[in-house]
Amino acid sequence: MSTIFAPASFLKSAIAATLLSSTAILATAHAADFRLGVRADALTIDPIASSDNSSIWLELQVYDQLVRPSKDGSKLEPAIAESWTISPDGKEFTFKLRPEAKFSDGQPVTAADVAFSLQRAAGEKSEWARFFKPITSYQVVDDHTIVMKLDKPFTPILNNLALFSASILPAKLVQQQGDKFFEHPIGSGPFVLKSWTRGQGEELTKNPNYWEKNKPSIDAVSIEVVPEDNSRVLKLKAGELDAITDVPYNQAANLKTDADIDVHAAPVFRVDLVQLNTTKKPFDNESVRQALNYALDKEAIVKGILRGNAKPTTSSIPVMAYHNEKLKPYPVDLAKAKELLAKGGVPDGFKTSMLVAAGDVTARQVASAIQASLRKVGVEVALQTIEDSSQFSTTKSGNYEMSLSYATSDTIDPDQLVGFTAVNPERANAFHTQWKSDRVNQLYADERQTPDGPERAKQFQEIEAVVHEQAPFIFLYTPNSAYANRKNVSGFEVVPTANYVLKDVVVK
Amino acid sequence: MNLLFFCISRLLQLVPVLLGITIVAFLLLRVMPGDPATLMLGSRGTPEDIAALTSQLGLDRPLWQQYLSFLGDIARGSFGRSIAYKAEIGPLLIARLWPTLALVGLSTVIAVLMTIPLAMYTAVRRNGAVDHAVKFFFVTAMAMPPFWLGVLLVLPLAIAVPIFPVSGYGQDWLDKLHHLALPAFIIALGTAALTIRSLRSSIIAVLGADYVDTARAKGLPERSVLRRHVFRNSLTSTISVLAVHTSWVIGGTVVIETVFGIPGLGSLLVASISARDYPMVQGLTVTFAVLVVVINLLADIAYSIVDPRVSLS
């Protein structure tokens, strides 16, 4: 697009000169050092009442947690807690808080604040209570030491403490102010929420009391909500923004040609897949499900539609901790697919339907590609577009045959996605496929009580292998999250949990 | 006095209309698959979590009870609490109301400013080059989807030559005007396409009337014939076209709001429907209904000013 208007650039300086006076008055001074364009606005800044990404990502700028994921998402590192120990039976966690950690109002972060915040997160009003309920008692030893006890070992708990919903709040202020606290929230994270205009964005300023030395490097950030993908790209090009998230793939290549802009692709913990309703024929048959996996050309979809911004997956778990390296994605093998269809009793293929989210352009393109691929083995798929918010409820009610969807992880531990996509009965009955493996259920129960280490790794790897083999889904790919910044910005990053990190941003 | 009485009686007539609208909006939302608790908890919720949240939101009560408590909230001058924002709906809604009103108001002003001279000129110089050019230009503009037109204008006017901002809503009122100019112009193109045609044909009809011949015969200069006798008498039908179209624009700004990142009511409505934020959608529906009635009220008042024969009773 830039080439079309390139000839106009000679006009640019001339007209700009004449307009200089007017634009100088009209453009209000932006105090922020760094302007970030995002797709959607946050809804709330109460960590126990958030389930949308925009709210979660904002909260991670303002609040801090005991522990946090490393930037590559491979392990946990100290945050407010400078160290911790776990008793050999896995039922007692002792955290030592940083003495230098302070809230943005200058008050120290104490063990009492931690106990209050986590009890609140496990309380009645919390949408995340299940994540913290395994902790049955909190013992404040001194201002900087807290002991948490569990009735039985629950290994994922440490990862849950790194969730935004486990943010540490100042107990006194929240108790005094109630819900009003969140109008002017105070946290111990790298930034302070200075102002928030609903639907438009937020102004953040540096928390002068942040515990990490010399961070953040910038004094102020403005987060601007620009819902339209093209507008966000255009604003970055025009220099009205310094960085943007959610760059559409079809724009990423174009944006790379801009000499002032860096485009990045971050691998995130997300898997795209096709749910197969295993209560319906012929999806109750394992061979048929495998056949569909062999029939699909994932590489072609990744190259053609996602422009290389994805990697084919082996199961419903993306590449994260404890990943099973031995598994390979199902290759395209039409002969094998036909053989398996015959074995499953449908040698000539069959007719079926697939739900696709109406508002997702990429999903609609991928669905057409799946349709074309499966036609080659005689499987006729009728695409059924469905309003995005109805899709989950529809698959949950069991009223579907195939559904193109995805799953994401909030934590860096595979426990969450295993529980969601592979275990039945559990909260989603293997992501609404109703597929059931007693072996996976057993391994899931074991994994949650096994301390982190090689044994837990084996359990997860076996779960992945079973899911891969029995194929309750057509496994597709794990996509990258594309983001971009102007060249004078460094340190802006989207991490595997899909949130952005602002504390390391430097603007030259 | 007459005017005040008229306004009050019209607003009272609104009550049964609103009741009907609330019932339809209320029931339609509940018929849609998907519920707020499931959407909020998504992959994280066990059936027990979802049931607990549903009951916490009061959505497990019988429908008639939920409807009555919604009416009770309105009677107390509140729309209740938003499920998605977890806050009072009133202030959230009002914050979004101003951008929409500013956008619609500005676009209407621009449309009127384009309509009057162009309609007069093309009516008088019928079938001339300008007439054809205007017709071609506005039909083309109307046929283009607004999001496409938006991007098409942003490229030259905000990127190549940065006169206007690419998107956003701005800080003080001058900055806001600067931000709203381009989107308002795009909406105005659609409005003007209709009003120019409507006003042009009324003017042509009025030009053939006997009293126009009389005015000319008594020696009035053409300029004041047009202004005093023709223009004023051709306005009524255009006012109703403008009123109907503006009512439509109020609910239809969502595309432009999204393209230009203006935090208005339209985008809030779409987001709230997606989140199944029942109280918010109900509050918005009532707000839209009130706005449409107010616009029609303003149109009626404008009739009576333009044409003294129209009385407000």
Image: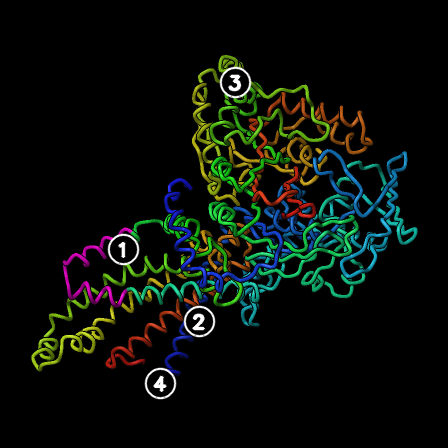
- How far across and down, in percent of the image, does residue A207 sit? 73, 56
Q: Nearer the viewer, residue A12 or B190?
A: A12
10 Å crowding of disc 1: few (<14), some (14-19), many (20+) = some
- Lateral position of residue B144 relative to residue A147, left or right: left
> Which residue is under mark 2?
B15
Q: Amino acid at mark 1?
A: Phe
Q: Amino acid at mark 3?
A: Val
* B124 within the magenta span: yes
Span colored in magenta: B115-140
Q: Nearer the viewer, mark 2 or mark 3?
A: 3
Gap in Å between the C-alphas at discs 2 and 1? 38 Å
In this rendering, is residue B209 above or below A331? below
> Which residue is under mark 1?
B138
- Label 2–label 3 contact, CB within 8 A: no
10 Å crowding of disc 4: few (<14), some (14-19), many (20+) = few
- Label 1–label 4 contact, CB within 8 A: no
* B146 within the magenta span: no
> Which residue is under mark 3?
A332
Gap in Å between the C-alphas at discs 4 and 3? 79 Å
Q: Amino acid at mark 4?
A: Asn
Q: Main secondary structure of the magenta part?
A: helix
Which of the numbered marks, if any, corresponds to residue B2? 4
Gap in Å between the C-alphas at discs 2 and 3? 64 Å
Does residue A241 appear in this view? yes
